[in-house]
Image (tube, coloured by chain):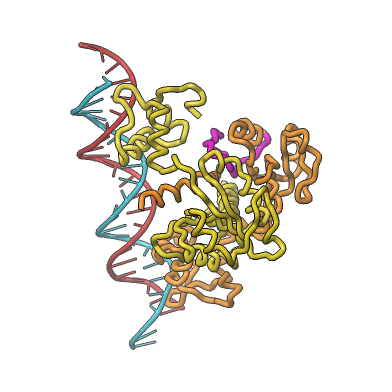
Chain colours: A orange, B yellow, C cyan, D red
DNA sequence: TAGATTGTTAATCGATTAACAATC
DNA sequence: TAGATTGTTAATCGATTAACAATC
């Protein structure tokens, strides 16, 4: 965003304000990975961006599979933010025979029973789980068995996976309930 | 889930295992709100649920407005998890004249310019922002001006709002990038 | 050189965990 | 009564912040 607005240099203090953290936090976090600023000057935005991309490993395209091609899953297949961030949903799976074979947002829905086969041949590292809560643990196991080590879980169920498998949870209902709690407290 | 499985009593230790926290954490968190267990016995699941619902304030239906009826927004209008959790999306807004007036998942899309009018007459407390990042700060201001104090923000932009307005952020791309980072580190 | 701002050490703060008395 | 488990105090741990020397 800064680069787009032709801001070449920014201080930790100005940057921190934009992302709602303290300047110390911003500098300390960076310090775990190296030195990216110039004392007395600030941070060169283009350089900082490219270094951060390297740290995160988001400088290369990543192939992702979607499991569960319901309404939410279908929307994610076409989510512009993903494509803008080197996130490429290349395959989608479902267990519903009515969905298998159909095309959603340009992607053919495949049979989840053939997960392992597709995962191994298509260099997929990450799976997004948009399946009903009651199926998610079973699906997580299938995904792990297929050799995937990173899962984005959209259910409120905490997954049991081996400890070398990373899970990010997005629980949209909980986020709303968090807001309800704060509204209520006031 | 426990109630559905006819588990009437559960210890902090068993409960904690299910939600992937320590038993001490579970007990300490509850202790901020009161005493909900029986020493030597454990927690009665039905009682615990009803008490937790009271604490969170999720025991009553909440009206929510969706702003931005794109693909993701459209999917949220029909998200079963919301309806199962007393979360009721009653109105949806967009600024696109092509969308205004159309029906998405049974809900008529209204003109965002008429936000204030609808919010005030329909007891809406929470807004979900599914608009493009470049518009989100402006939309957040409109929402706040309409008297809403709770926002669920689906963009990666940190919103500037008065401090009596609560914001929850869901940044799906960041969650994937988090996974990429951990994969990369290994 | 003077002013600004980083990177980092040390101090503080808050959150998690250990331990145990209370009690079912 | 003995065993189990809570609720809570005290100890520990880790994260945030303050402060400042290094340096642009």
Residue that lies at the very extreme toward the front in this rendered image? B121
Residue A8 horizontal side relative to residue A60, left or right: left
- Image quadrant assignment for residue B174: bottom right
Q: Quadrant of the N terminus of chain A?
A: bottom right
* Residue B169 included in the magenta stretch of the image: no
Q: Position of residue C11 (x, y in %)?
A: 25, 59
Q: Nearer the viewer, residue A170 or A146?
A: A170
How many numbered marks does the figure carry? Answer: 0
Q: Residue at x 70, y 50 (%)?
A: A77
Q: Nearer the viewer, residue A92 or B89?
A: B89
Q: Position of residue D2 (x, y in %)?
A: 25, 12
Residue A88 horizontal side relative to residue B176, left or right: right
- Image quadrant assignment for residue A60: bottom right
Q: Residue at x 47, y 26 (%)?
A: B3
Is residue C10 shown above or below A123?
A: below
Q: Residue at x 51, y 49 (%)?
A: B63
Q: Position of residue B52 (x, y in %)?
A: 40, 37
Is residue A185 shown above or below B112?
A: above
Q: Position of residue A108 (x, y in %)?
A: 79, 44
Q: Residue at x 36, y 53 (%)?
A: A186
Question: Can see residue A150?
Answer: no
Q: Which residues are magenta?
A: A146-165
């Amino acid at each position: 965003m800064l680069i787009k607005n032709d801001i070449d240099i920014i201080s930790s203090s100005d940057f921190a304000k934009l992302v709602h953290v303290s300047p110390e936090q911003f500098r300390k976090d960076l310090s775990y990975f190296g030195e990216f600023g110039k004392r007395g000057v600030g941070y060169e935005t283009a350089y900082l961006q490219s270094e951060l991309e390297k740290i995160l490993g988001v400088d290369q395209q990543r192939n992702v599979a979607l499991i569960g091609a319901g309404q939410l899953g279908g929307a994610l297949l076409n989510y512009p933010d993903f494509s803008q961030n080197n996130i490429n949903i290349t395959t989608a799976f479902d267990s519903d025979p009515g969905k298998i074979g159909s095309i959603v947002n340009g992607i053919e829905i495949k049979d989840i029973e053939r997960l392992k086969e597709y995962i191994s041949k298509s260099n997929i590292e990450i799976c997004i789980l948009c399946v009903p809560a009651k199926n998610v643990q079973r699906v997580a196991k299938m995904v792990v068995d297929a050799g995937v080590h990173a899962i984005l879980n959209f259910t409120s169920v905490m997954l049991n996976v081996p400890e070398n498998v990373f899970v990010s949870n997005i629980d949209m209902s909980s986020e709303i309930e968090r807001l309800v709690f704060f509204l209520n407290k006031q």
